[in-house]
Image (tube, grey):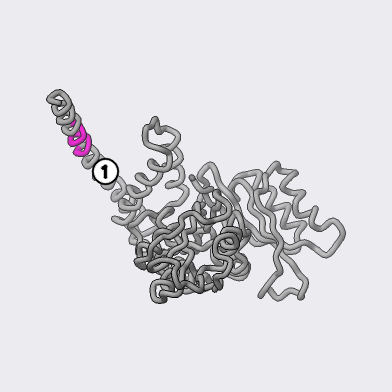
């Protein structure tokens, strides 16, 4: 016992010494970041491509025992705090507080920015376009339920650019103020209801399902109504004082939602990027093949191809546009050549932006 106590004392002293060195180095890093901000003299300080490069390098060099996710989270907060010394970011998201969108904001920007919850995806686009927010975070697709149509429609008709993406593992929880005794209705976002459809059929077949604007709103409503339960994330349960009755009720354990970071600019090349665009085919035989041929000709890989009605774009009732994600940055030679050829072949092309692929 005496030997153990002596070793514990030495280990704690070593930790104190390392903590002191970490503190010194963190402030040294902050000083370098401050100097960079002075050199930029009011220009955009936040560089998503640079942050992605830093995080990738640190994850690749990590010898353990800390996990990749831990390294990502620690250095994300370090960079967030350093950036806040130079530029107080305002980030809009689909609210209220406690939504998965808020979690996506924190995953991408850390905890330093000022968060601006909005009532709809439309409002997120508006506040970014107007300059009342520097960035916005909006859901674009889910691995189980597919595309978020409203986000796609707004990308078509807005001047907004994409400068980043976030992949957020989504775990749904059934929650209520007390228990399920006396509960007659269930609040949740329509996407979450779809992602938990089979679990609900097996376990709550007689409960009325009521879609609302967000999972955080579902939790808020359930907190005010003892006859209601909700599906939401753990953050919403904590915020609204609800008990989690069943955790991880999603039908797909790998359920993931992809979010886009939107701004009035895209990002520079990071070495591992995506480019998103919208195009339409000319009205002639083989027109869709003409949209894909430039990618094959220039050896550019496509990761997403989806058609959608051209809502609000002045087309005919049955006119469609195609949403595409391709690997590489628009400034990369193969991508630039593919886009140039695509413009010659397509009826319409709109580049939405190039940005770093999600680090994790």
Question: In which quadrant of the rendered view does residue 133 lie?
Answer: bottom left
Question: In which quadrant of the rendered view does residue 243 lie?
Answer: bottom left
Q: Residue 19: say if magenta.
A: yes
Picture coordinates of residue 134, whole percent (x, y):
42, 64
Name the outermost residue toward the right. 285
Give the magenta part as a residue range: 14-20
Characterize the magenta stretch by its predominant secondary structure: helix
Question: Which residue shows up at 43% across the image and 60% down it?
Answer: 245
Question: Which residue shows up at 38% across the image and 32% down it?
Answer: 64
Task: Tell me the element at label 1.
Answer: helix
Q: Is residue 57 left or right of residue 288?
A: left
Question: Which residue shows up at 46% across the image and 59% down it?
Answer: 173
Tell me if I can see residue 283 in this picture: yes
Q: Considering depth in this image, is 111 or 236 the residue closer to the camera?
A: 236
Q: Is residue 353 left or right of residue 319?
A: left
Q: Residue 88: say if magenta.
A: no
Mark 1, other Cα within 10 Å: few <14 / some 14–19 / many ≥20: some
Which residue lies under the disc numbered 1? 26
Picture coordinates of residue 299, whole percent (x, y):
70, 41
Question: Which residue shows up at 47% across the image and 48% down it?
Answer: 49
Question: In which quadrant of the rendered view does residue 286 lie?
Answer: bottom right
Q: Is residue 15 left or right of residue 331?
A: left
């Amino acid at each position: 016992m005496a030997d153990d106590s002596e070793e514990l004392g030495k280990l704690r002293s070593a930790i104190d010494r390392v903590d002191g060195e970490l503190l010194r180095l963190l402030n040294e890093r902050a000083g370098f970041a401050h100097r960079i901000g002075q050199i930029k003299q009011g220009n955009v300080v936040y560089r998503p491509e640079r942050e992605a490069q830093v995080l990738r390098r640190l994850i690749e060099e990590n010898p353990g025992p800390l996990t990749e996710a831990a390294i990502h989270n620690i250095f994300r907060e370090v960079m967030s705090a350093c950036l806040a010394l130079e530029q107080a970011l305002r980030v809009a998201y689909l609210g209220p507080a406690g939504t998965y969108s808020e979690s996506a904001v924190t995953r991408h920007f850390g905890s330093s920015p000022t968060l601006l919850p909005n009532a709809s995806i439309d409002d997120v686009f508006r506040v970014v376009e107007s300059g009342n927010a520097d960035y916005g975070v909006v859901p674009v697709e889910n691995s189980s339920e597919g595309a978020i149509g409203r986000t796609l429609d707004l990308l078509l008709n807005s001047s907004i650019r994409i400068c980043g993406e976030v992949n957020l593992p989504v775990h749904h929880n059934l929650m209520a103020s007390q228990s399920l005794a006396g509960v007659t209705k269930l609040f949740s976002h329509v996407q979450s209801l779809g992602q938990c459809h089979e679990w609900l059929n097996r376990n709550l077949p007689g409960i009325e399902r009521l879609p609302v604007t967000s999972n955080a709103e579902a939790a808020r409503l359930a907190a005010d109504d003892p006859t209601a339960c909700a599906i939401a994330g753990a953050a919403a349960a904590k915020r609204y004082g609800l008990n989690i009755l069943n955790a991880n009720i999603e039908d797909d354990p790998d359920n993931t939602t992809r979010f886009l970071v939107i701004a009035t600019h895209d990002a520079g090349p990071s070495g591992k990027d995506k480019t998103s665009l919208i195009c339409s085919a000319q009205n002639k035989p083989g027109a869709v093949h003409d949209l894909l041929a430039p990618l094959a000709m220039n050896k550019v890989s496509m990761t997403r191809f989806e058609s959608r009605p051209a809502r609000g774009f002045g087309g005919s009732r049955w006119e469609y546009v195609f949403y595409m994600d391709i690997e590489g940055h628009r400034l990369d030679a193969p991508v630039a050549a593919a886009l140039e050829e695509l413009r010659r072949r397509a009826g319409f092309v709109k580049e939405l932006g190039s940005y770093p692929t999600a680090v994790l």
